[in-house]
Image (cartoon, rainbow, N blue to C red):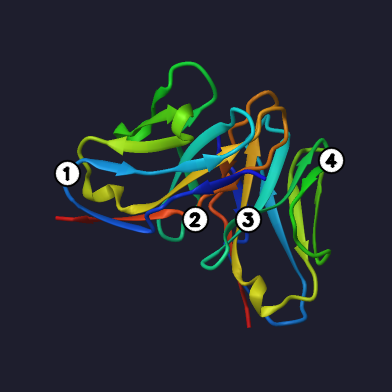
Amino acid sequence: AQSVTQPDIHITVSEGASLELRCNYSYGATPYLFWYVQSPGQGLQLLLKYFSGDTLVQGIKGFEAEFKRSQSSFNLRKPSVHWSDAAEYFCAVGPQGGSEKLVFGKGTKLTVNP
Amino acid sequence: KAGVTQTPRYLIKTRGQQVTLSCSPISGHRSVSWYQQTPGQGLQFLFEYFSETQRNKGNFPGRFSGRQFSNSRSEMNVSTLELGDSALYLCASSQTGDETQYFGPGTRLLVL
């Protein structure tokens, strides 16, 4: 069965610092990969997705992620964090082929210090 | 386009009662999926509907059920509520041919 691991439960960074959130997945084929962000009390907002092609994908709010097949990873990065980026971030994997089930990691909560 | 909408946003029920949550997908989206989010278990897939048919189902007891209408709106029902059903219930919709799911704001259910 597919699974997603986000090793860091909680990360604290200073405003203006760079950020990397880790995501590793276990899946038998090339999956669809997603990063979502959730602010307190809100739903999930899509940051970016990878289906195929260029392994470096750009998303909204200045985020990017890189798919590395050899490492089964899809890490999320941002060069300079803003206080408004404080939220919880979820990595998810979805199967190709039409089944609409996403498997999520446990999430990484990001705190941004001024 | 308007996003995914969910009603109600907040709900308080007592054990043993039943509850119905509603989800309206993005216009033109025919697939609707439901997820349960709790602090302990995280985000877990409940079921997915497409063209009024349940296409996929997660590992939840039969107390959890859903349906989809001809206009793609979906409802989920939980019968005989238990304290452990307290959660944020998220609905997501997607377009045919696109695996991207777009989420609504969720319904927060508290069972007392």
| Residue that badge 3 annotates | B44
Which dot marks residue B52?
A: 4
To the question of a shared chain for discs 1 and 2, the answer is yes
To the question of a shared chain for discs 3 and 4, the answer is yes
> Disc 2 on helix, strand or loop?
loop
Q: CA distance from mark 3 to mark 2?
A: 10 Å
In x, y percent, where is residue B49?
A: 77, 42
Of the pair A15 and A26, the residue shown nearer to us: A26
Q: Name which of mark 1 and mark 2 comes first in the sequence.
A: 1
Which dot marks residue A17?
A: 1
Q: Would you place residue B85 above or below residue B9 in this image? A: below
To the question of a shared chain for discs 3 and 1, the answer is no
Image quarter where the C terminus of chain A lies is bottom left
> Disc 1 on helix, strand or loop?
loop
Q: Nearer the viewer, mark 4 or mark 2?
A: 2
* Three-letter code for the amino acid on which mark 2 is drawn: Lys
Q: Quadrant of residue A55?
A: top left
Q: CA distance from mark 3 to mark 1?
A: 32 Å
The residue located at (75%, 61%) in the rendering is B60
Q: Quadrant of residue B98?
A: top right
Label 2 marks a residue whose chain is A
